[in-house]
Image: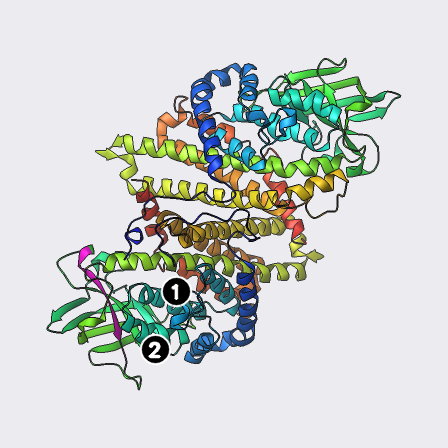
Amino acid sequence: MNETLIRDSGRRALLPPFKDEHEELRATIKRWVEAEIAPHVEEWDDAGEFPRALYDRAGELGFLGLKYPEELGGQGGDYVDDAVWAEELAAAGSSGGVGAGLGAHTGIATPPIWKFGTPDQHERFLRPAIAGQKIGALGITEPGAGSDVASIRTRADRTDSGYLVNGSKTFITNGVRCDFLVCAVKTSPDGGHHGISFLILERGTPGFEVARKLEKLGWRASDTAELSFTDVEVPKENLLGPENGGFYLIMANFQWERLLMALGAVGAMRRLLEVTIAYALEREAFGRPIGRFQSIRHKLAEVAIKMEVARALTYHALREFIAPELERREAIARQDWGHPSIGAGLEEVTKAKLLTQRAAVEVADECLQIHGGYGYMKEYGIERALRDLRLGPIGGGTDEVMREILGRRLGL
Amino acid sequence: MGATETVIKPEHDGTRKHFIFSQEHLDLRESMTQWVKKELWPHRNEWEDTMWPDSALKRAGELGYIGLCFPEEYGGQGGDYFYSLVRAECMSYTGSGGTNMGFAVQSDMVLPPVHLLGSEEQKQRYLVPGIKGERIGCLGITEPGAGSDVAGIRTSAIRDGDEYVINGSKMFITNGARADFCVLVTKTDPSARHDGITLFLIDLRDDEGNALPGFSVSRTLEKMGMHASDTAELAFEDMRVPADCVLGEIGKGFYHISWELQGERLVAAAGCYAGAERMFEKTLEYAKEREAFGRSIGHFQVIRHKFADMSTKIEAAKQMVHATAWRFANGEYPVREITMAKLFATRVCHEVADECVQIFGGYGYMKEYEIERAFRDQRLNRIGAGTDEIMLDVIGRSYGL
C-alpha cells in the first residue's frame, strides 16, 4: 500500500482557477504587506487614514493595475490576479481600513471606467489611477437610499455643456480625499432603475464638497465621507457609459465588488485562524497549552471549517464569474444587456457574499473569545478584526438583500 | 481511486465546463437518475416495511452502476473517482435513505478496499460478483463496546496452523443481516492497539445462504430511520477461516480502514448535499402551492429568506465536497478537508431537513409528504462514518491542537 494513503503529506495543489504564476504574486503581495503595511495598521487606524503615499507605492509596484491593459500602465493580467490581491491583502495582515481604501480604488471605482469609459476617460482617470497618482471613489449610496438603488435622488439636469448636479452621497469610501468620484445620478425623474446615469465628478469642482468625515465601528484607517453637491457643473465628456444606462453599470460591477468582499473575508479568516492557532498552542492554562483542551480544539476546528467552506464556495463563484469574461466585454461594448454573460455567476456570487461575510464575523468573534482578555485588548489586532469584519454583512448589499436576490431567483 | 506519486495538475483551460464533471459524468447522471426514478423510487414506501430486495442491487449491477469506478477487467466501468459522487447524487432520488445506504455500503465501502488491497484471487471471488450485485457485502468495524475508537475493538483473530480463529461481535452492521461476505476488522495482536489490527475478507454464508459455522446474526436492530436497510449485530464464535482470508497486510488494518473511511466520508458528504437538494426542491414546490393569509407561503419574506439560506448552505457543501474530491482523485490524501466536508455536509443536510419539516408545518410532521422520513433517515449521517465530535477532533488535531 502506498505510503501516501497512510499519512496526509499536507501537500495541496492549487484550486482552480489559481495557477503557479499566481503564487508568485501572492508571495510578492505578502512580503509587501508584512514589510510596509502590517507594522503600521494600528497607527493608521488611530489616525483615521493611511498615508496617501501608499497609493503611489502600490501603483509603483503594479498592484493597482493588475487586471488592466499594459497600454494604460496596467499589468495586463486578469480578474484572477485581482482576486489574489484581494485575498492576500487581508491574509497577510493589512487592516480592514487599508483593504477598503485600496480595494475601493482598484475594485469598485476604476472598473466601470475601464469597462464603460471612452479612450479620453481612460487617459484622464484610469491611467493616473493605475499609477496611484489619482484616487478614485464610487458614489451610489445616499442618506435616503442604500440597498434600494432605484430610489436615489441626486439629480443631474442637462445643460448646454453637460450636467448640473445637486444632491448628496454618504458612506463613500475614499470620499474625503478622492480625486474623482464615479457617481450615480438621476438623469430622468421617471423610469426607476432606467433613469440612472453615471458621471465622473472631479475634486475641486465648485459645489462638490465633503460634508463630513464619518466615524465608524471599524475600517478606521479608511476615510468615509458624506458628500454634498450644489450646482456642480460636470462636462458632458464626463458621462460614463450610456445616459440612463447606469443601472447596468451598477449591476455589472456589483458582482465583482461582492466577490472581492468574499475573497477578502476568506483572507481575513485564514489569518485569524493562523494567528489564533499559534496563540492557543503558546498560551498555557492549568498546566497545558489551551489549544490542547478539547473545547478549544473544537472551536478552532469550527473556525477552520468556516474558512475552508467559504474558500470552496468563493472560488466556485470566481470560476463562474470569470468564465464568460470575454463575451461579457463584447456584450457591454454593444450594449447587449440581455446577454447571458452579463449575469454570469450572479447566484454563486450572491451566495458567496452571503455566506462569507457572516462567517468572517463569527470567526473573528470566536477567535477573540479564544484570545480571552488579550483578544479584547488592542495588541493582537483581534478586536480590530472583529470591528472591521462587522461591515461585511452590511456593505456591498446587506445579507437581507442577498437573501431577497436569491429568494426571487427561486421564484419566491 | 488513484494513488499516484505526483499530483495531477488541474485542467484550467480544458474543455471541462464543470469544475470536476465532464459531459460523460453529466450524461451518466441523467441516465442513472432516470433509472432510479423508474425502478427504485416507486418502491420507497413498500421497502420501509420489507427492506430493499437483493434483486434491486443485482439490477444496479447489471446496469453497471456498482462498478462505475472499478477497472473493466473486473467487470467495472473504468471511471474515475468522480463517478462515485455522481452515483451518490443519483441515489438521492430514491426517496429512501435506507436503500441509498445499503447500496453505498456495497459500492463505496466494501468493494473499494477489496479492489485496493485484495489478492487476485480475492478480487475474482468478491470484487467481480460484488460489482455484478450477485454477492452482497458488509463492513464490520464497530462493536458493542467500540465505535469511534477503532483501536479499541476486541474481536480477535488468532492464528492456528493454516487458519485463523475469530471470536467477537460486531454492531450496527449495515447489510449485516443478509450479507454473503464481510470485510472484518479484527485484532490479530490483542495486546497492541493500532498496530494489532488486521482486516479479513471472509464468507459469512454458504451457497444456500446458510450461516457458516461459528457465524450468526444475533439480531436485526430497530432504529429511528433508515428502515429500508437491515442493520445487524453479528456474532463470531470460534469461526475458523483460512489464513489467505487476510485482506491487505497483517497489523496494517487500522491504516487500511482509515483510508477506506476517507472515501466513505466523502461519498456520504455527497449524498448529504444531494439529499438536501431533494428536500429543498420538494419543499420549494410546496411553499409555492400552499396558501396562508391570502398568498402562497413562499412569498412571505421570512419563508423566502429561509430558502435563500438553505440554497446557500447546500451550494457551499457541494463546493466543499467537489473541491475535496478533486484533491482526492488527483492523488492527494486530504484527510483534513475530507473530514471538514463530511461534517459540514451532514450538518447542512440536517439543518435543511429540519427547516423543511418546519416549512411543511403539520404536514411535515405527518408521513404523507415523506419529509419526516427524510428527517429521520438523514439524522444518522452525523453519527455514522465518524460522529461530528470525532470529526472536530480529527480537524483540530490536524492543526497540531
Q: Where is residue A1 in the image (x, y as percent from the top left)?
A: 27, 58
Q: Position of residue A348 (x, y in %)?
A: 59, 46
Q: Distance between the residues labelled 2 and 1?
A: 18 Å
Residue B371 vertical position relative to residue A409 in the rendered view, above or below? below
Q: Point out the tag, 2 or 1, that comes first from the N-terminus.
A: 1
Residue B377 vertical position relative to residue A95 in the rendered view, above or below? below
Disc 2: which chain? B
Whether residue B401 appears in this view of the structure is: no
Judging depth in this view, the residue of B30 and B47 nearest the camera is: B30
Q: Main secondary structure of the magenta part?
A: strand
Residue that carries the numbered disc 1 in the rendered image: B108
In this image, B268 relative to B234: left or right? Answer: right
Going by the numbered disc 1, the residue's amino acid type is: Asp
Residue B181 vertical position relative to residue A279 in the rendered view, above or below? below
Residue B263 vertical position relative to residue A375 in the rendered view, above or below? below
Judging depth in this view, the residue of A349 and B16 nearest the camera is: B16
Q: Where is residue B236 in the image (x, y as percent from the top left)?
A: 21, 73
Mark 1 burial class by Cα count in 10 Å: few <14, some 14-19, many 20+: many
Q: Which mark is residue B178?
A: 2
Disc 1: which chain? B
Helix, strand or loop at mark 2: loop
In the image, farthest residue toward the front: A71
In this image, B127 relative to B25: left or right? Answer: left
Q: Position of residue A278 (x, y in %)?
A: 33, 32
Q: Residue at left 50%, top 35%?
A: A265
Mark 2 burial class by Cα count in 10 Å: few <14, some 14-19, many 20+: many
The stretch in magenta equals B195-205
Q: Which of marks 2 and 1 is in front?
A: 1
In the image, farthest residue toward the bottom: B208
Helix, strand or loop at mark 1: helix
